[in-house]
Image (cartoon, helix red, strand yellow):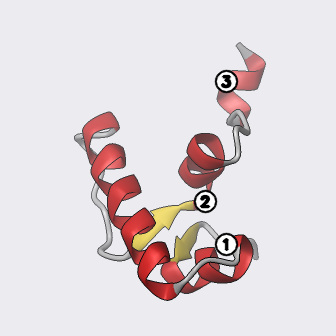
Amino acid sequence: MTKQFYRAKDLQEMLEISKATSYTLINKLQEEFKKDNPNCITMNKFIPVKYFEEKCLGKASETNEKN
């Protein structure tokens, strides 16, 4: 089963950044996610993998690629 959410530790390992920086990044992405998706429920200290990949890695989501 593939991950659907990243934690700060995942970002820390993947991006080779400090723990504090990974938490800062998660918090910033969560704020943006809440603005972009006001009807979604969010979990504290987690960010959806698809949203992270779209915002930070420049990967288009599957729905965007089809349009």
- In the rendered structure, which amino acid carries the disc numbered 1? Lys
Q: Position of residue 36 (x, y in %)?
A: 33, 35
Q: Cα distance, mark 2 to mark 1?
A: 7 Å
Q: Position of residue 11 (x, y in %)?
A: 60, 74
Is the residue under label 3 in contact with that under label 2 (CB below 8 Å)?
no
- In the rendered structure, which amino acid carries the disc numbered 3? Asn
Q: Label 2 crowding class (10 Å Cα cut-off): few <14, some 14-19, many 20+?
A: some
Residue in the foreground of this view, choosing between 64 and 21: 21
- Location of the C terminus (image quadrant): top right
- Which mark sits nearer the N-terminus, 1 or 3? 1
- Which mark sits nearer the N-terminus, 2 or 1? 1
Numbered mark located on residue 64 in the image:
3
Residue carrying label 1: 3
65 versus 15 height, above or below:
above
Q: Secondary structure at mark 2?
A: helix
- In the rendered structure, which amino acid carries the disc numbered 2? Val
Residue carrying label 2: 49
Q: What residue do we see at 40% from left, 76% from top?
A: 23
Is the residue under label 1 in contact with that under label 2 (CB below 8 Å)?
yes
Q: Cα distance, mark 2 to mark 3?
A: 15 Å
